[in-house]
Image: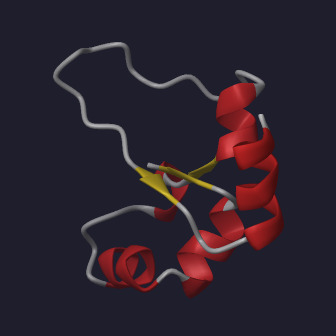
Amino acid sequence: MFADDAATAVRQCGPVASAIAGGVLDEVGVVSIGDVITQRWRASEDPGDVRLYVSVGLGIQDAAVMDV
């Protein structure tokens, strides 16, 4: 799972925080989108794996993405 900002997602994104609290998701499994873009983190290339992006509501980033 990757998000605008991993630290914000694990604290403020309800479904992510609930999954962590319930033991369904490990906080280490939430990665910032910047780490994906700069390839500091690489996702599995297995076509059967699920990749999930969670937007945590950073409006300025949404606007910047729309401009690209």
| Nearer the observer, 48 or 57 | 57
Rendering quarter of residue 8: bottom right
Viewport quadrant of the C terminus: top right
Rendering quarter of residue 35: top right
* Relative to 44, residue 67 above or below: below
Q: Tell me which colouring the rendered structure shows.
A: secondary structure
**Which residue shows up at 65% across the image and 32% down it?**
36
* Relative to 49, residue 54 above or below: below
Numbered disc total: 0
| Nearer the observer, 61 or 21 | 61
| Nearer the observer, 25 or 51 | 51
Q: How far across and down, in percent of the image, does residue 62 sit?
A: 70, 58
* Relative to 47, residue 43 above or below: below
Q: How far across and down, in percent of the image, does residue 2 sit?
A: 53, 48
Q: Residue furthest front?
A: 67
Q: Residue furthest left?
A: 48
**Which residue shows up at 26% across the image and 14% down it?**
46
Rendering quarter of residue 25: bottom left
**Which residue shows up at 22% across the image and 15% down it?**
47
**Which residue shows up at 41% across the image and 73% down it?**
16
Please indicate whether residue 4 sits to the left or right of residue 16 in the image: right
* Relative to 36, residue 56 above or below: below
Q: How far across and down, in percent of the image, does residue 66 sit?
A: 71, 47
